Amino acid sequence: MALVLDRLVDGDLRGMFDGSTTTDIDLDAPLIVFDLSHIDRNSIAMPILMAIVGVWLEHTWIRPDRKKRIFLVEEAWHIINSPFVAQLFQRLLKFGRRLGLSFIAVVHHLSDVVDGAAAKEASAILKMASTRTIYMQKADEARATGRVLGLPRWAVEIIPTLSPGIAVWDVNGNVQVVKHLITEQERPLVFTDRAMTEDAIIERTRASKQLADDPAA
């Protein structure tokens, strides 16, 4: 155990766990976010962090207190690829109904999950998921997704033609094409193309011109 922990104290992972504990985090807040975006996805630090988060989720946050909870995992492909974490997700799905827990995993390509190190666990998670939502994909990826999820041929053929906001939904075998309606209040939360919009380009051009006219600025 000392040799394993050495990396966390004197090795390349030093500083992750040997500092002071942050005391002003409210773990009972309505929304809790674990931001792991600064961690290298291929680093050994990722499964270690997820193991710690997973233990806390399983034994502290999720309680049989009749409260409905939503557990959302973004960029889930590199997390599910850890067999330990994938097994945790399996347990959460298995007991989710009894615990009032909704589990949502977001992946860009299904092949990243089913062909990874935890392929067996990932396949089990896909089988237990009652709702699958598939947005536009390239034709070859759509065919691979269709084979894994058992989608009908018409759904596989339509996936490459879907527009933003339109998806194929598979709810317990009932496959439909669904258009998502976004309210003005929701739009700022889900709009991820802000840097590519005309207003952003104009603003960058204006800032560059100002800098060129007045280098001291």
Image: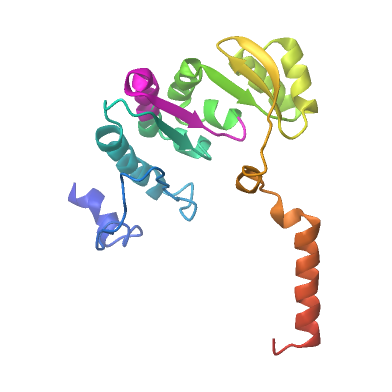
Residue visible at 32% across and 23% down in the picture: 99
- Quarter of the image for residue 138 reads top right
> Where is residue 43 drawn, in percent x and y?
44, 49
Give the total number of marks visible in the rendering: 0
Q: Please determine whether, in this image, residue 203 is positioned above or below residue 78.
A: below
User: Looking at the image, can residue 68 be seen?
Assistant: yes
Q: Please determine whether, in this image, residue 114 is positioned above or below residue 128.
A: below
Q: Is residue 123 magenta?
A: no
Q: Is residue 107 magenta?
A: yes
134 and 31: which one is in front?
Answer: 31
> Where is residue 188 drawn, in percent x and y?
64, 48
Residue visible at 66% across and 48% down in the picture: 192
> Where is residue 51 drawn, in percent x and y?
32, 40
- Quarter of the image for residue 140 reads top right
51 and 183: which one is in front?
Answer: 183
User: Looking at the image, can residue 81 be seen?
Assistant: no
- Quarter of the image for residue 165 reads top right
Residue visible at 69% across and 86% down in the picture: 217
Q: How is the image coloured?
A: rainbow
Drawn side of residue 161 relative to residue 108, left or right: right
Drawn side of residue 46 relative to residue 133, left or right: left
Q: Which stretch is magenta? A: 87-109
> Where is residue 168 drawn, in percent x and y?
68, 21
Drawn side of residue 178 relative to residue 213, left or right: left
79 and 23: which one is in front?
Answer: 23
**Looking at the image, which residue sits at the far left?**
2
186 and 50: which one is in front?
Answer: 186
